[in-house]
Image (cartoon, grey):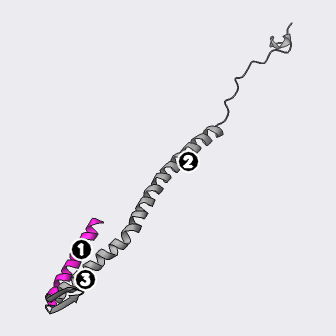
Amino acid sequence: MAVVYLILALLIAVVAVIFAWQNPVVVSITFFAWKIDSAPLSLVIIATLLIGIIVGWLFAAPSLVKNSFRASGNRKRIGALEKELEDHRTRLSELLKPAPAAPASPVPPANNSDTDPLGHS
């Protein structure tokens, strides 16, 4: 993602240089008590753009911080819920295990004929 931002920044810088090169007109600026008699038009426009970006970022910063805190809280909650889910799954698998079979006890003989396979007494 950093590469995309770098390429975008370079593209904007190239466009700004081309814009400044093609607009060498000098203008005078008056803003309340400030007065600038000769400033390049390209510098005025680029400075205005930068000021607009900074002001926009300042207005967006509180919601960005709020969303960051909310996302952090959500990640913690997701972790806790995933652990709870794993605990429930473990408990469920223990409950669903078949009960161990009772040990087989030998059947006592019903009479003496059971002890003699030929039936002799």
Kind of residue at badge 1: Ala
Q: Residue at x 16, y 86 (%)?
A: 20
Mark 1 vs mark 3, foreground winner is: 3
> Circle 3: is it few (<14), some (14-19), or many (20+) Cα within 10 Å?
few
Q: Does the segment drawn in magenta span residue 71?
A: no
Q: In the rendering, at what x and y percent does residue 25 appear? A: 14, 93
Identify the residue at image location x=59%, y=44%.
88
Label drawn at residue 85 = 2
Is 90 displayed left or right of 109 in the figure?
Answer: left
What's the CA distance linking mark 1 and mark 2? 45 Å
Residue 27 position in % (x across, y down)? 16, 92
Q: In which quarter of the image is the N terminus?
A: bottom left
Stretch of the chain drawn in magenta: 1-22
Q: In this view, does 67 lie above or below 98?
A: below
Q: In which quarter of the image is the C terminus?
A: top right
Give the residue type that dot 3 points to: Thr
